[in-house]
Amino acid sequence: MIEYLYDAIRAVAGQEIKVEAYITDENENFITEGCYFVLHDKAGTNVLLTKLGQFNTETMNWDFVLAPEETKGLSGRYLYCIMHNDSNLCFKQPIYLM
């Protein structure tokens, strides 16, 4: 299960989590390569996981799939961001894992 409230995400740890993102550059051109989902610890200081996404040409979205074993045992509020190559595309946002 995954729910979105604007940029906040709520999901069940220990299950497959598929995060979808619509990513364009400043000219509204689709970015089609080199995007990552980065999961940070609760303080936002340490990286727990970096996941390369897949650009879906049918939906024009990015799919970031976290395997069950990657979130197993996590609980509470963490932070995530999406990166393109070495650049953050957003500020760190909350992800709540149950």
Image (spheres, rainbow, N blue to C red):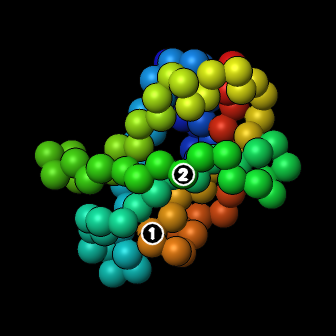
Q: Residues within 10 Å of mark 1 (few under 14, many from 20)?
A: some
Q: Residue at x 40, y 61 (%)?
A: 35
Instruction: Give the mark toward the camera: 1 or 2.
Output: 2
Residue 94: which disc? none
Locate residue 74 relative to residue 18 in the image: left or right. right
- Write the residue at 66% across / 38% down: 95
Residue matched to label 1: 84
**Disc 2 on helix, strand or loop?**
strand
Real-space CA distance between mark 1 and mark 2, rounded to the nearest whole angstrom: 12 Å
At label 2, counting other C-alpha atoms closer than 10 Å, the crowd grade (few under 14, some 14-19, many 20 or more) is some
> Residue visible at 45% across and 23% down?
16
Position of residue 2 relative to residue 25, above or below, is: above
- The x, y position of residue 56, in whole percent, is 22, 48
In the image, taking residue 48 as reference, residue 1 lies left or right, namely left
Q: Nearer the viewer, residue 67 or 64?
A: 67
**Above or below: residue 98 compared with residue 18:** above
Residue 11 seen in render: no
Residue 25 place in picture, x, y as percent? 37, 75
- Label 1 SS: strand
- Residue 94 vertical position relative to residue 33 in the rendered view, above or below: above
Q: Which kind of residue does numbered mark 2 sit on?
A: Thr
User: Taking the image as drawn, is residue 7 in sight?
Assistant: yes
| Most distant residue in the bottom direction | 27
What residue would you read off at disc 2? 50
Residue 82 is situated, as x and y percent measured from the top left of the image, at 52, 58
Residue type beneath disc 1 = His
